[in-house]
Image (cartoon, rainbow, N blue to C red):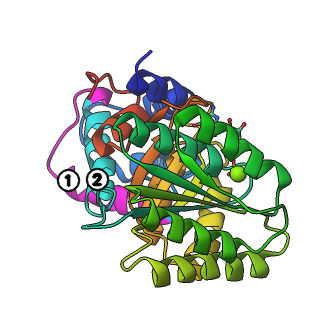
Amino acid sequence: MGLFQKLKQGLARTSNNIRSKIQSIFQPGALTDEFLDELEAVLIQADVGVEATTALIDSLREESRGKSFETVEDLYRTMAEEVAGIFASIDAPLKVAGQGPTVYTMVGVNGSGKTTTIAKLAHRYTSQNKKVVLAAADTFRAAAGDQLEVWAKRTGADLVRHSHGSDPGAVAFDAARAAIARKADLLLVDTAGRLHTKKNLMEELKKVIRVISREIPGAPHEVILVIDGTTGQNGLIQARVFARAVDITGLCITKLDGSSKGGIAVAIASELGIPVKLVGVGEQASDLRDFDARGFAHSLFGIDQVEC
Ligand SMILES: Nc1nc2c(ncn2[C@@H]2O[C@H](COP(=O)(O)OP(=O)(O)O)[C@@H](O)[C@H]2O)c(=O)[nH]1
Ligand SMILES: [Mg+2]
């Protein structure tokens, strides 16, 4: 199955839900205020978030003035384009260093998919014959380093790790030095995600980022917040917490192959103005794709689209 099909299937529950609710209230013709109110509730329930929903409803109201929607499919298409527009307005591809290693740091709560996403990126870049170094800066979870080691071996990436419980800043330092010395193209930095000591975690992340930026000018080129696409509104709350502490440059929404609530991607992008850069659509190394705003938006409304 293609990655786009996996995404579409993963979003099927959300899109079916959205479609059946809209279908039940849709009447051909002009959009009434009553309909728009109900539509608002449908979007909120789909985790699109208050801010994005308000913006969508407002522009739909604007756009539909003097216009009539003959079929509900017309409406889905208009809405999908609007959602795509929210993403497109902040869209930015993964940044790459002009010279020296490009550094991507993954942050996010435990279980969101940071280590897996690093593995997928390692797979992507080693497949392109790039030299990749992984930094196991999640020293909190004993298994995290082991997990990364398995993926390093599998993908042919180098790994820099210290013993369990050691200073993540020191791992970042060694990894940055190693990436430069070995003329690596990519340095991918894994971090811890425990939230019960929120303050310490944020301080730790800041330190990791500080160390990297000191050792490699212009780095990290991306600080990617990894969000589990199945967590709904919790994802928005997590994004606010992380964005307050560190400068998040992009999002990776994972588990969009599962029973995800993809609406959360719209909510975060809209409220925090952070572009979605990557989506995870499975547990395999190849299950990662660059974010495609239109493809995603069309999938959210269950609109058939050719593979893109
Ligand atoms: N179905 C699916 N599972 C994923 C995806 N990304 C990560 N996972 C799974 O989510 C779990 C937690 O992932 P992990 O990378 O260890 O999260 P971390 O704690 O943030 O490092 C693992 O079982 C992964 O296999 C994805 O895109 N789709
Ligand atoms: Mg991990």
The quarter in which the C terminus is drawn is: top left
- Looking at the picture, tell me which residue is in the foreground, 294 or 288: 288
Decide if residue 158 is on the left or right side of residue 109.
Answer: left
Query: Which label was assigned to residue 98?
Result: none
Q: Residue at x 49, y 71 (%)?
A: 248
Q: Residue at x 42, y 76 (%)?
A: 216
Q: Residue furthest front?
A: 181
Q: Quadrant of ligand 1?
A: top right
Q: Residues within 10 Å of mark 1 (few under 14, many from 20)?
A: few
Q: Which secondary structure class fits the magenta region best?
A: helix
The quarter in which the N terminus is drawn is: top left
Decide if residue 107 is on the left or right side of residue 79.
Answer: right
Q: Residues within 10 Å of mark 2 (few under 14, many from 20)?
A: some
Q: Which residue is mark 2?
A: 60
The local secondary structure at tag 2 comes to helix
Amino acid on which the number 2 mark rests in the picture = Leu
In magenta, the rendered stretch is: 51-73
Q: Which residue is mark 1?
A: 63
- Indicate the position of residue 55 as horizontal and vertical percent values: 36, 63
Kindly tell me whether mark 2's CB lies below 8 Å from ligand 1: no
